[in-house]
Image: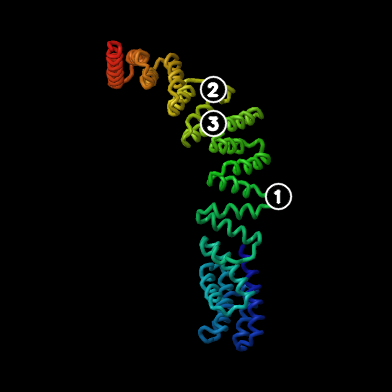
């Protein structure tokens, strides 16, 4: 990077010296600029600085502007980016540079501002700049740097359009940016390109399934996982758990339940007490009380745990199945469930059952 910066500085010095000669600046200033240029080319930065400071010029004159500009490129070559920005910005804002010099300096100021992560200034200097791969990349990354992916994404699409070879980093950016903006279908298409390049990579399959989950396409996500599984991709329990958690956390517990059911049906996850309890919890979160009750009934019979019986009782009571709920509470009590919780649920169920019976009797007498 330093070699590139130095080359830019030398080119700028050559351009400004020619311009200075054309505009007949004072001979001593012209000699100072040429001396500074030669010293900078030789890597003698101290001598270059001394040459620039050896002459006196009138304030706000063209000669002053050219000295600022020359020193700006000199300190940039030395790695002092912020100082370079100050000097080049002063010379640019003087209004005394040629159109060619101003265009060159705006681009270099954009590069300098980008290097110090001043992304808003980067974009300001790039206003009106010619559209090239270099300026597009800077604008994309600058918008990304200030958190405006909605601005960066169209520019990235423009940058990649027509390119035969796209780097993996750009594909990953397109996946992430589209996903962040909830453009899941577009993110999925870019992810498929990554998957084609790394069909044996677990993360590529997981990412694709996750995007499909976020798009609400649980069946498609399951099909993706099944395809990967059939190709011999080994999933860890935590890998699959994270996808189920993703669906649940995004407010779609019913999709998470279906995904988990599919994984269990196709042998991708072991059917045990842990996975069955999780499935029951997901059905409960999705307010699918009948299925949740079925799962907890099976679980309670298998484990004999009081908490499982208590969960079953709550589900039955929530459905207004008072007798089934009271029976489950009796089983929970025998299995050692929390006595206070059992008593509270029993009192509530019995009071509601008594109220319903009273209401039924009143209707019968009518």
What count of labels does the image hold? Answer: 3
**Residue denoted by label 1:** 165
Q: Is residue 335 visible?
A: no
Which of the two labelled residues, at mark 2 and mark 3, occupies the earlier sequence position? Answer: 3
Which of the two labelled residues, at mark 3 and mark 1, occupies the earlier sequence position? Answer: 1
Question: Can you say which quadrant of the picture contains the C terminus?
Answer: top left
Spatial CA distance of label 2 from label 3 is 11 Å
From the top left corner, tell me how far across and down residue 191 is, in percent.
62, 41
Question: Can you say which quadrant of the picture contains the N terminus?
Answer: bottom right
Spatial CA distance of label 3 from label 1 is 33 Å
Q: Is residue 121 left or right of residue 161?
A: left
Front residue of 360/273: it is 360
Which residue: 49% across, 24% down?
A: 275
**Residue denoted by label 2:** 270
Mark 2 residue element = loop
* Residue 217 sits above or below residue 32 on the image: above
> Residue 56, labelled with which disc?
none
Which of the two labelled residues, at mark 1 and mark 2, occupies the earlier sequence position? Answer: 1
Among the 4 quarters of the image, the one containing residue 298: top left
Which residue: 63% across, 37% down?
A: 201
Among the 4 quarters of the image, the one containing residue 2: bottom right
Which residue: 58% across, 69% down?
A: 106
Mark 1 residue element = loop
Spatial CA distance of label 1 from label 2 is 42 Å
> Residue 240, labelled with which disc?
3
- Which color scheme did the rendering employ for the protein? rainbow
Front residue of 231/164: it is 164
């Amino acid at each position: 990077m330093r070699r590139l910066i130095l080359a830019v500085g030398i080119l700028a010095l050559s351009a400004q010296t020619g311009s200075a000669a054309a505009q007949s600046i004072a001979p001593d200033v012209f000699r100072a600029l040429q001396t500074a240029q030669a010293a900078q080319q030789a890597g003698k930065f101290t001598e270059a600085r001394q040459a620039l400071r050896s002459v006196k010029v009138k304030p706000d004159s063209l000669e002053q502007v050219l000295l600022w500009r020359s020193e700006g490129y000199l300190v940039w070559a030395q790695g002092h980016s912020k100082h370079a920005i100050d000097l080049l910005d002063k010379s640019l804002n003087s209004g005394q540079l040629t159109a060619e010099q101003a265009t060159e300096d705006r681009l270099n100021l954009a590069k300098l501002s980008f290097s110090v992560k001043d992304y808003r200034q980067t974009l300001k200097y790039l206003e009106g700049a010619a559209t090239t791969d270099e300026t597009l990349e800077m604008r994309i990354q600058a918008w990304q740097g200030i958190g405006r992916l909605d601005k960066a994404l169209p520019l990235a699409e423009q940058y990649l359009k027509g390119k035969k070879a796209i780097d993996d980093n750009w594909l990953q950016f397109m996946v992430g940016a589209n996903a962040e903006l909830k453009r899941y279908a577009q993110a999925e298409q870019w992810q498929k390109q990554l998957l084609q390049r790394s069909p044996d990579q677990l993360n590529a399959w997981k990412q694709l399934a996750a995007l499909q989950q976020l798009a609400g396409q649980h069946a498609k996500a399951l099909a993706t996982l099944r395809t990967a599984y059939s190709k011999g991709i080994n999933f860890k329990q935590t890998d699959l758990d994270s996808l189920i958690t993703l669906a649940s956390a995004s407010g779609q517990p019913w999709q998470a339940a279906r995904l988990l059911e599919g994984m269990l049906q196709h042998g991708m996850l072991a059917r045990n007490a842990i996975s069955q309890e999780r499935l029951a919890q997901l059905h409960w979160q999705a307010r699918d009380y009948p299925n949740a009750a079925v799962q907890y009934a099976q679980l309670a019979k298998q484990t004999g745990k009081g908490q499982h019986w208590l969960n079953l009782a709550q589900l039955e009571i929530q459905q207004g199945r008072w007798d089934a709920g009271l029976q489950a509470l009796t089983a929970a009590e025998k299995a050692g469930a929390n006595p206070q919780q059992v008593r509270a649920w029993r009192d509530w169920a019995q009071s509601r059952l008594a109220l319903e019976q009273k209401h039924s009797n009143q209707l019968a007498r009518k």
